[in-house]
Image (spheres, helix red, strand yellow):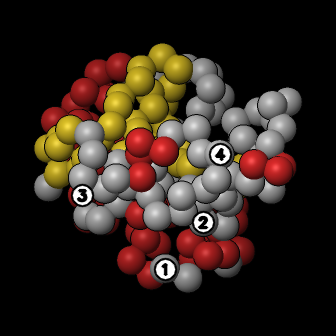
């Protein structure tokens, strides 16, 4: 099982609370105008990592984790992503993820439901350049929400 990874950034403080390891996964079809990372749109970009090797690297940093990219919910190999998330959760790590889908849109995509169940916090919605707000914490535009998935999935 493998995932295409553009970058692994340990010790970042911009992709969620505290110091985190951000994993930038390759691939995104949203192609939001003004995207800060258009190089992430290519699903074949980055370096191919064995999922267990990736998990070992990330766990060794001892920081909570953020999945970003690209759009981690669009990862072609959902089973590989679920395996990675199970390893991270078993290590006691908190997981955030960024997606261009709204939560309601994501919940309609059955194949990614197992991924959502392993994420603690979801930052949802496409980046909208006209709604850009540099004062927002952990979001690029005001339409995006920071969602506690455990609470939200219990009510859905």
Classify the position of the N terminus by image quarter: bottom left
Q: Residues within 10 Å of mark 4 (few under 14, many from 20)?
A: few
Q: Secondary structure at mark 2?
A: loop
Vertical position of residue 153 compared to residue 9: above or below: below
Left or right: 85, with 127 as reference point: left
Label 3 near label 2: C-beta < 8 Å?
Answer: no
How far is the residue under mark 3 from the one under mark 1?
A: 17 Å
Comparing labels 4 and 3, the label whose residue is closer to the camera: 4
Left or right: 78, with 19 as reference point: left
Quadrant position of residue 90: top left
Residue, disc 3 = 80
Q: Secondary structure at mark 4?
A: loop
Vertical position of residue 37 compared to residue 125: above or below: above
Q: Residues within 10 Å of mark 1 (few under 14, many from 20)?
A: few
**Residue located at (42% from left, 52% from top):** 41
Q: Position of residue 91 (x, y in %)?
A: 35, 36
How far is the residue under mark 4 from the one under mark 3?
A: 30 Å
Residue, disc 2 = 101
Front residue of this view, candidates 47 and 20: 47
Label 2 near label 1: C-beta < 8 Å?
Answer: yes
Q: Secondary structure at mark 1?
A: loop
**Residue located at (56% from left, 49% from top):** 98
Q: Secondary structure at mark 3?
A: helix
Residue, disc 4 = 34
Mark 4 vs 3, N-terminal side: 4
Mark 2 vs 3, N-terminal side: 3
Quadrant position of residue 40: top left
Comparing labels 4 and 2, the label whose residue is closer to the camera: 4
Comparing labels 1 and 4, the label whose residue is closer to the camera: 4
Residue 122 visible somewhere in the drawing: no
Mark 1 vs 4, N-terminal side: 4
Label placed on residue 109? 1
């Amino acid at each position: 099982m493998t995932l295409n990874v553009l970058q692994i950034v340990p010790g970042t403080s911009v992709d969620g609370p505290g110091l985190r390891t951000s994993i930038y996964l390759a691939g995104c079809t949203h192609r939001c105008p003004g995207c800060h990372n258009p190089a992430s749109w290519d699903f074949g970009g980055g370096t191919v990592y064995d999922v267990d090797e990736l998990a070992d690297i990330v766990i060794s940093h001892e920081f909570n984790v953020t999945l970003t990219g690209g759009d981690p919910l669009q990862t072609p190999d959902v089973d590989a992503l679920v395996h990675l998330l199970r390893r991270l959760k078993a290590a006691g790590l908190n997981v955030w993820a960024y997606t261009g889908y709204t939560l309601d849109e994501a919940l309609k995509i059955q194949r990614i439901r197992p991924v959502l169940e392993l994420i603690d916090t979801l930052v949802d919605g496409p980046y909208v350049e006209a709604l850009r707000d540099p004062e927002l914490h952990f979001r690029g535009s005001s339409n995006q929400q920071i969602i506690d998935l455990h609470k939200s999935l219990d009510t859905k």
